[in-house]
């Protein structure tokens, strides 16, 4: 390489880096250089020139290095590093990842108890939370991922399920296992009631109306004080029993099996309940995908007009997707109620719908494994950020990592969408594979193809 | 013309898009075992007629009789169930689903026990689709997608096949292939075909009878050979296109 293009590269890189630094200076001026605090008689302005200059210097330096070695370089140093996973490996990973995750999920409480005995309850509780979102994600995946109906009010069915159980328990003294199917049924019915008038809408319009329904349910729960308790919520929701055995200190599960009483038993039990519920959701979804109705959902997502021209009753197809999705939301809701023991409309805000939808979209629309990964990353990630105590040692005792939770969270979402615009798992497994029969016909032999 | 042997009889059909009139009293007959083509310029209302037969949009007045039953008020999905299959304009295959799944979607209304035989039938007609059976629909070439659209329609075992511009955007050689397959289907299996085309020369050569549509009206009709000879048809639709 001779000197001339090299110096050209240098000049260009410096120029580009200077532009980036200037941008950083302008943007950073208000965020870094100026700081306002509430003082006596107004705002106190302090200047932090040092911080500002450091920020500019970092942008200049990093941009320069990136230019020199990656963006403008003839041979970017990343070219050799570029991730070239052989396709055989990806399919192999794809094949084992499901069973491996399942094995981990099945044994998780015992792994946690063995590895972190002092914090096992906290971790199992987190696992229950993640699993709840996995189930909600799988339920919403039927509606959004398979049938392509953008539902921004999914939390409504979660709320219907939770309140169905809570109210049934309060007024009729019905236990969890009796209420569970009823809650699912009621949520599915609400799915049909809400779905019927709006499912002729499409895309954005449907999204807005479902958003409104989600809010209406919450506002009704909030204001119907005599029936739902309004903002006070409902407390004392019964815990699930194990074939009639309670998880109480005496005469319950522990006594019956001759174990020492430990409150962890109930957590483990709750974990397995939600695991089984989630697995049922997954199993039903995977089965339905192979049946005509599931195929029709996916076709509907692809092209509604084509579906109609093939004789598909699009209204019924959408309604089944909507109500089955709602039913699983309802199951998850009544589980949520029994786990918390207390529910109030505050748990069913739009943010909840948004998180579930984000899980489905980030995971990759229609991908079951994607939902699992996205739930672990998002819900687990939020919790990890809560516990980043060591950052205090770096940034000083004033640093509060939880304040940056949403920032980091948003950044992570943007990065995933840049890196994988169709979600973490964007490939789709066909529900049917054509296999040619290996019998060699005489016509093939005649054409010389029968080898 | 007696309507008794008709598979499809359209009488005085008017269709509107809001206040805009698209079809102004259309009469069309399709007899069993015929290939009938409808030609006309862009915006003449050809596709609207095809969609109206399937009930979306609905005819505001007039009647559409298929196989002895008035279907002008029947919901779309039930019309399809009665034995009309459509290869819609622009093909509209399911791009993210495999060829196999697209064909399964076509067979949605048919008893499962026929599936293997029907699949073999369409793969014999379109060997290219067999090679591509496990590929995603969106990865096929335009011609292959058109073949898939027709094959998908055939999977529903129709009595009447509606084809909306199968030649759209395809190379002449592929168009010829597709038209030959349509002809084969008609002569070998007696399938009735109603073909909407802009490619008037090929369509009229293929069809037993043809209709010319201008501005929502049928202005001419006759056998394909007759229409090909008419000066008006030549001037309007064939000049420079007749090869």
Image (cartoon, grey):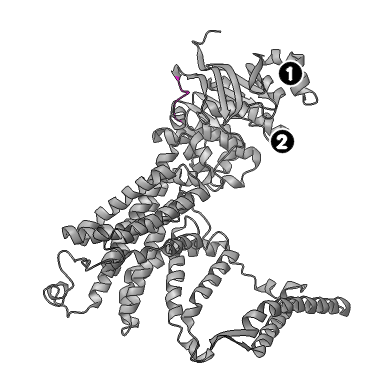
**Disc 2 to disc 1, how far (Cα)?**
23 Å
Horizontal side of residue A53 vs A305, given as left or right: right
Image quadrant in which the C terminus of chain B is located: top right
Q: Chain of mark 2?
A: B
**Mark 2 vs mark 1: same chain?**
yes
Across and down, in percent, residue B199 comes to 70, 27
* Location of mark 1 (residue): B233
State the SS at label 1: helix
The residue under the point 44% across, 44% down is A199
The residue carrying pointer 2 sits among few (fewer than 14), some (14 to 19) or many (20 or more) residues within 10 Å by Cα, namely few
The quadrant in which the N terminus of chain B is found is top right
| Residue furthest left as drawn | A251
Which structural element holds mark 2? loop
Highlighted magenta segment, given as a residue range: B70-75
Residue B109, picture quadrant: top left
Q: Is residue A442 visible?
A: no
């Amino acid at each position: 390489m001779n000197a001339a293009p090299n110096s050209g590269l240098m000049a260009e890189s410096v120029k580009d880096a200077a532009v980036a630094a200037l941008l950083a200076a302008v943007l950073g001026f208000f965020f870094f250089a100026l700081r306002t605090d509430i003082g006596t008689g107004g705002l106190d302005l302090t200047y932090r020139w040092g911080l500002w200059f450091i920020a500019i210097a970092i942008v200049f330096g990093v941009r320069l290095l990136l230019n020199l070695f990656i963006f403008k370089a003839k041979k970017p140093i990343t070219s050799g590093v570029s991730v070239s996973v052989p396709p055989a490996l990806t399919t192999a990973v794809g094949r084992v990842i499901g069973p491996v995750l399942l094995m981990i999920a099945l044994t998780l409480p015992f792994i946690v108890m063995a590895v972190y005995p002092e914090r096992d309850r906290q971790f199992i509780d987190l696992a229950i939370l993640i699993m709840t979102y996995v189930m909600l994600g799988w339920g919403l995946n039927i509606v959004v991922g398979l049938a392509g109906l953008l539902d921004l009010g999914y939390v409504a069915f979660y709320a219907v399920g939770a309140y169905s159980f809570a109210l049934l328990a309060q007024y009729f003294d019905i236990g969890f296992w009796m209420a569970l199917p009823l809650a699912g049924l009621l949520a599915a019915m609400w799915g049909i009631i809400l779905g019927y008038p709006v499912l002729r809408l499409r895309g954005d319009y449907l999204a807005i109306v479902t958003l409104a329904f989600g809010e209406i349910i919450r506002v009704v729960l909030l204001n119907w004080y005599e029936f739902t308790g309004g903002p006070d919520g409902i407390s004392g929701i019964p815990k699930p029993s194990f074939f009639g055995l309670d998880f109480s200190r005496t005469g319950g599960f522990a006594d019956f099996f001759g174990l020492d009483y430990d409150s962890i038993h109930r957590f483990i039990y709750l974990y397995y309940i939600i695991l089984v519920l989630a697995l049922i959701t997954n199993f039903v979804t995977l089965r339905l995908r192979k049946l005509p109705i599931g195929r029709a959902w996916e076709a509907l997502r692809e092209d509604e007009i084509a579906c109609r021209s093939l004789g598909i009753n699009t209204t019924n197809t959408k309604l089944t997707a909507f109500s089955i999705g709602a039913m699983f939301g309802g199951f998850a809701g009544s589980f949520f109620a029994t786990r918390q023991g207390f529910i109030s409309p505050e748990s069913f805000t739009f943010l909840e719908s948004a998180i579930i939808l984000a899980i489905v979209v980030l995971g990759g629309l229609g991908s079951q494994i994607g939902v699992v990964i996205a739930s672990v990353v998002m819900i687990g990630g939020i919790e990890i950020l809560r516990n980043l105590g060591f950052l205090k040692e770096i940034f000083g005792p004033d640093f509060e990592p939880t304040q940056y939770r949403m920032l980091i969270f948003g950044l992570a979402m943007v990065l995933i969408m840049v890196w994988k615009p169709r979600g973490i798992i964007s490939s789709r497994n066909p529900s049917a594979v054509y296999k040619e029969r290996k019998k060699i016909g005489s016509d093939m032999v005649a054409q010389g193809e029968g080898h | 013309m007696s309507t008794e042997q008709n598979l499809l009889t359209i009488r005085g059909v008017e269709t509107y898009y809001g206040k805009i009139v698209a079809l102004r009293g259309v009469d069309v007959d399709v007899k069993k075992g015929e290939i009938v083509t409808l030609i006309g310029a862009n915006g003449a209302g050809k596709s609207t007629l095809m969609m109206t037969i399937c009930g979306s949009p609905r005819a505001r007045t007039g009647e559409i009789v298929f196989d002895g039953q008035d279907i002008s008020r029947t919901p779309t999905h039930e019309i399809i169930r009665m034995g009309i299959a459509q290869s819609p304009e622009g093909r509209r295959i399911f791009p993210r689903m495999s060829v196999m799944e697209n064909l399964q979607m076509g067979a949605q209304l048919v008893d499962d026990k026929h599936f293997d035989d029907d699949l073999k039938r369409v793969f014999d007609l379109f060997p290219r689709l067999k090679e591509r059976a496990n590929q995603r629909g969106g990865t096929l070439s335009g011609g292959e997608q058109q073949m898939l659209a027709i094959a998908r329609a055939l999977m529903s075992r129709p009595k009447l096949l509606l084809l909306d511009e199968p030649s759209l955007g395809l190379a002449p050689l592929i168009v010829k292939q597709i038209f030959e397959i349509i002809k084969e289907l008609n002569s070998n299996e007696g399938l009735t075909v109603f073909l909407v085309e802009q490619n008037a020369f090929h369509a009229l050569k293929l069809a037993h009878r043809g209709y010319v549509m201008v501005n929502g009206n049928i202005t001419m009709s006759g056998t394909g050979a007759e229409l090909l000879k008419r000066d008006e048809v030549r001037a309007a639709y064939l000049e420079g296109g007749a090869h």
